């Protein structure tokens, strides 16, 4: 989830490139060199291809480019998708994992949910823990900035934790439960 694709214009050589970057590690590099057009490159839902624009003698066309597992390096050759079209964008309506880094999903949680969602009052985090332990509950805005943190004690079995959403601005948040190198995330909307 922490990858982006963008256009780079080199005014010295008058070339347009599509770059990929991992905002978590700081790695970046060209995915498509000298594509001849500025546009809005975008990743598909699986993050294994990007859609981008390229200029030819017939005009601006849409292409796809496969990606290596780093998601910021090309794999194979670009493939034409649509001629005489531009401003292509992949859309997805699925749910992405919002876990970051190399942290694994929580192995000690059987089930985790939050209700009501959206919430303008107190949202209830419900989870079923396999064991007693201490964890950190964190609420982050969509920029990844932590706006709330709380250390919680989980008992084996059903647990319910109230989270007052009233102090926060309306919008989308990520609720993270962290223990050691493990993390579980849920999306929470403040209405």
Image (cartoon, rainbow, N blue to C red):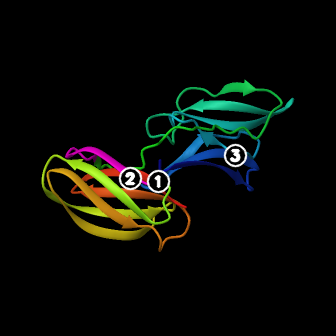
**Residue 153 image label:** none
Residue 95 image point, x, y percent: 48, 41
- The image quarter containing residue 90 is top right
Specify the segment rendered in magenta. 105-117
Of the two numbered discs 3 and 2 on the same chain, state the one appearing first in sequence.
3
- The image quarter containing residue 149 is bottom left
* Mark 1 to mark 3 CA distance (whole Å): 32 Å
Q: Which residue is mark 2?
A: 114
Q: Furthest-right residue in view?
A: 58
Instruction: Tell me the crowding category of disc 3: few under 14, some 14 to 19, or many 20 or more residues within 10 angstroms, Cα based.
Output: some
Of the two numbered discs 1 and 3 on the same chain, state the one appearing first in sequence.
3
Asked whether residue 160 appears in the rendered view, the answer is yes
* Mark 2 to mark 1 CA distance (whole Å): 7 Å
Query: Are discs 1 and 3 less than 8 Å apart at CB?
Result: no
Q: Which residue is mark 3?
A: 40
Element type at mark 3: loop
Query: Are discs 2 and 1 less than 8 Å apart at CB?
Result: yes
| Eye-nearest disc, 3 or 2 | 2
Instruction: Tell me the crowding category of disc 1: few under 14, some 14 to 19, or many 20 or more residues within 10 angstroms, Cα based.
Output: some
Element type at mark 1: loop
Residue 31 image point, x, y percent: 58, 40
Q: What is the quadrant of the C terminus in the image?
A: bottom right
Q: In the figure, is residue 96 to the left or right of 43?
A: left
Residue 50 image point, x, y percent: 60, 36
Element type at mark 2: strand
Query: Are discs 3 and 2 less than 8 Å apart at CB?
Result: no
Q: Which residue is mark 1?
A: 117
């Amino acid at each position: 989830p922490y990858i982006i694709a963008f256009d780079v214009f080199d005014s010295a050589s008058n070339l347009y490139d599509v770059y990929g970057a991992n905002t978590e590690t700081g790695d970046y590099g060209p995915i498509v060199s000298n594509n001849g057009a500025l546009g809005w490159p975008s990743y598909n839902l699986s993050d294994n291809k990007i859609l981008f624009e390229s200029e030819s003698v017939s005009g601006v066309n849409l292409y796809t480019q496969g990606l290596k597992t780093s998601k910021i390096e090309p794999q194979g050759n670009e493939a034409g998708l649509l001629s005489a079209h531009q401003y292509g964008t992949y859309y997805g309506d699925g749910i992405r994992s919002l876990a970051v880094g190399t942290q694994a999903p929580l192995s000690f949680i059987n089930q985790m949910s939050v209700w009501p969602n959206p919430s303008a009052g107190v949202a209830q985090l419900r989870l079923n823990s396999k064991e007693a332990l201490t964890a950190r509950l964190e609420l982050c805005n969509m920029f990844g900035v932590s706006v709330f943190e709380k250390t919680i004690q989980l008992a084996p079995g059903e647990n319910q934790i109230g989270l007052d959403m009233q102090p926060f601005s309306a919008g989308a948040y990520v609720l993270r439960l962290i223990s050691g190198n493990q993390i579980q995330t849920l999306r929470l909307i403040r209405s």
